[in-house]
Image (tube, grey):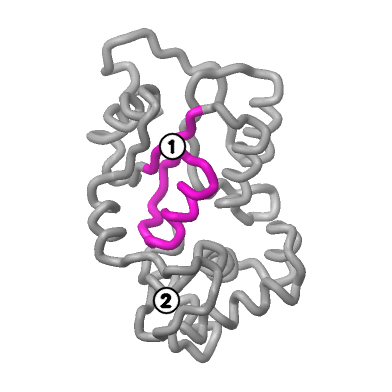
Amino acid sequence: MGIKSILKRREGNFRVVGEASSGKELLELLSSLACDLLITDFSMPDEGGSTDGLLLIRRLRRNHPDLPVIVLTMIHNPALVRGMFAAGVNGVVGKTAMARELSLAQQAVMSGRTYLSMDMQGKLEASPAPEEPGEKAPDPEAGLASLSPREAEVVRMYAGGLIVTQIAKRLRRSVKTVSQQKNDAMRKLGLTSNSQLYEFARNNGLLT
């Protein structure tokens, strides 16, 4: 309703042609319904209570390579935001900035440009990406900046309640790979327990 209200306040003829409450429902809807712009949440719970995240974005981009996509999210973790753009989104807007920035994002994306919320821009600039995403960072003190998008996504899903085998199934990776990515993330962050990992995720913008 909030998105509809924002779009109605803008000049032009905007029409909502479909709505979905889960990643699965969204993919099914797009397979039979054409649209000019998709505005989606980054994390939508499914029947099991888990969320989609980067996996949903990759599927959207694979199935609809030319569809402009704006993601709304409470996540402000630099690694995950970079992961969203790497997966193919055109714009990322923080939910707290939605009222003032969604229209700006829509204009930019529909004009062929990318858009990132202003508060997120500062966080990315202050937290440079590792030179080799996906590889072990040389400096454990680097904290958030040391996590690759894949590691950040594993941490997010684990802290969100999924176990390693469930994460592996959803991300289509081996259990060994997911376990290694979780362990690498904990090592980089200097964490020694799952409870510390959850606290880190909650305090550093990895959870919605």
- The residue at which mark 2 appears reads as 200
Q: Quadrant of residue 142?
A: bottom left
Q: Quadrant of residue 25?
A: top right
Q: Amino acid at mark 2?
A: Phe
Mark 2 and mark 1 in contact? Answer it, CB < 8 Å.
Answer: no
- Is residue 110 something that shows in the picture? yes
Residue 95 drawn in magenta: no
Mark 1 surroundings within 10 Å by alpha-carbon count, few (fewer than 14), some (14 through 19), many (20 or more): many
Q: Amino acid at mark 1?
A: Asn
* Residue 25 image label: none
Placement of the C terminus among the 4 image quadrants: bottom left
- The residue at which mark 1 appears reads as 90
Secondary structure at badge 2 equals: helix
Q: Quadrant of residue 22?
A: top right
- Left or right, 173 with reference to 132: right
Residue 73 drawn in magenta: yes
Instruction: Looking at this view, name the residue that lies furthest to the top.
Output: 13
Residue, x 32% and y 16% (percent of image)? 8
Instruction: Looking at this view, name the residue that lies furthest to the front.
Output: 131
Secondary structure at badge 1 equals: loop
Mark 2–mark 1 distance (CA, rounded to whole Å):
28 Å
- Is residue 2 something that shows in the picture? no
Which segment did they paint magenta?
A: 68-92
Residue, x 63% and y 55% (percent of image)? 49
